[in-house]
Amino acid sequence: MNWEALLNWKLLLQWPGPETQTIIWLTQVFVVVFCTVSLNFVMMRVLDILTVLGNKTASKWDDVLIEALRLPLRLVTWVIGLSVAAEMLYDVSESALFEHVGMVRRVAFIAIIAMFANRLITGVEHNLTDPGRMKKPMDTTTAAAVSKLLRVSVIITSLLIILQALGYSVSGVLAFGGIGGMAVAFAAKDLLANFFGGMMIYMDKPFKVGEWVRSPDRTIEGTVEHIGWRLTRIRTFDQRPLYIPNSLFTTIVLENPSRMFNRRINEKIGIRYNDWRKMPAIVADVRQMLIDHDDIETDARTLIVNFDTYGASHIEFFIYTFTKTTNWVRFHEIKQDVLMKIMEIVEQHGAEFAFPTRTLHMVSDDDQQDTPPAPAAEEAQHAHRG
């Protein structure tokens, strides 16, 4: 190997060919790869500096752009460097292995651009739904639906461009796709039903991620964790995941307790029959207590406290009211406080809560003697005498 040829720097600047000395083109390929690695390292350090500077700015979108560019820029650097080295090797050896370097590079560039677009869409979605970045964050379900549609559009468009770059007719592909789409529609009708069911969820928004839903038609109840194109994942209250096809939501009744305005307290309270004269005062005091309660909504919601019915061993009055909170735990704390105050009101009036009682009538021997015999007994006596 002629190492002295390396001293002639003009040879190193010339594009290699079949007659180029081995030491020259090997050095040139090494320099290209070394420059690629060095440029990649420098570019990453520059992006790190830009990230630090971006975190100090008031803008929320420069961070998204830098993060979206990080991986695509590295890939572009490697594609350019390796494709240049491959073209050098092709001009030196004319091997069939390197014939399609240009086509591979074009396809790689299209894929990298699509990757950048998808990463940018993901970053924007994260920003729009992050309460720490937005004063009025976008609805998670809507943002997820729009971002999925955009990502699918990017992928389909990039695939069509790649097919065009490979020499295929896009119009022919679209025509074939139209015919094939009909066959797929018949073969995958359940899949399409789930897809359009997901679209209806995104458009009508009967629920969104994080809400509590239940169905009186099916044993479905829990918190929505994820809404996909085919399945919706609900986490039940015993922490089991429930996977539901989206098409099911078009045929069942669905209740969304997360969107209630208030929670209801509907209780019946029984006191003794002996305390019936105290019932009006107890009912009036309970009503006033609920009106004065800070956590009970009485202005915009119905409030009923009335004597209701005669029980087997007690007389009942009932309360029908609503709390201001919809939080499940806080609701039970308020309900406990209300019930405890009702017990105090009943006690203040000298009344008592009823419990099941039974009156047993005992018949003595004297009562039995005074009781006239039954007709059957009298007939038996007459028959005996006869």
Image: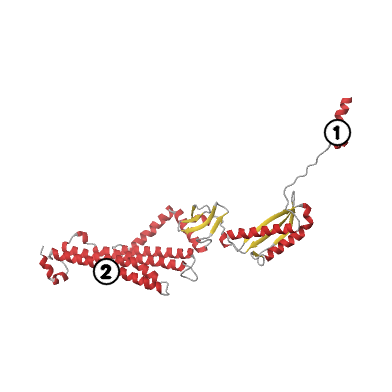
- Hey, which quadrant is residue 173 in on the image? bottom left
Are the two marked residues, 2 and 1, in contact with CB atoms closer than 8 angstroms? no
303 vs 144, left or right, is right
Along the polypeptide, which appears first: circle 2 or circle 1?
A: 2
Disc 2 and disc 1: Cα gap in Å? 120 Å
Residue 344, percent across and down? 70, 58
- Hey, which quadrant is residue 373 in on the image? top right
Query: Relative to the observer, which residue lies in front, 333 or 209?
Result: 333
118 vs 247, left or right, is left
Label 1 sits on a secondary structure element that is helix
Label 2 sits on a secondary structure element that is helix
Check residue 375 in the rendering and tell me which mark sits there, or answer none. Answer: 1
Check residue 332 in the rendering and tell me which mark sits there, or answer none. Answer: none
Q: Residue at x 52, y 52 (%)?
A: 238
Residue 234, percent across and down? 50, 55
Residue 222, percent across and down? 53, 55
Of the residues shown, which amino acid type is indicated by label 2? Leu
Query: Relative to the observer, which residue lies in front, 358 or 180?
Result: 358
Residue 11, percent across and down? 13, 70
**Few, some or many C-alpha atoms within 10 Å of disc 2 (few <14, some 14-19, many ≥20)?**
some
Of the residues shown, which amino acid type is indicated by label 1? Pro
Placement of 230 over or under 114, stated as above or below: above
Q: Residue at x 22, y 66 (%)?
A: 34
**Few, some or many C-alpha atoms within 10 Å of disc 1 (few <14, some 14-19, many ≥20)?**
few
- Hey, which quadrant is residue 304 in on the image? bottom right
194 vs 279, left or right, is left
Q: Residue at x 87, y 28 (%)?
A: 381
Residue extending farthest to the bottom is 58
Quarter holding the N terminus?
Answer: bottom left
Quickly name the residue at label 2: 39
Placement of 365 over or under 140, stated as above or below: above
Label 2 vs label 1, nearer the camera? 2
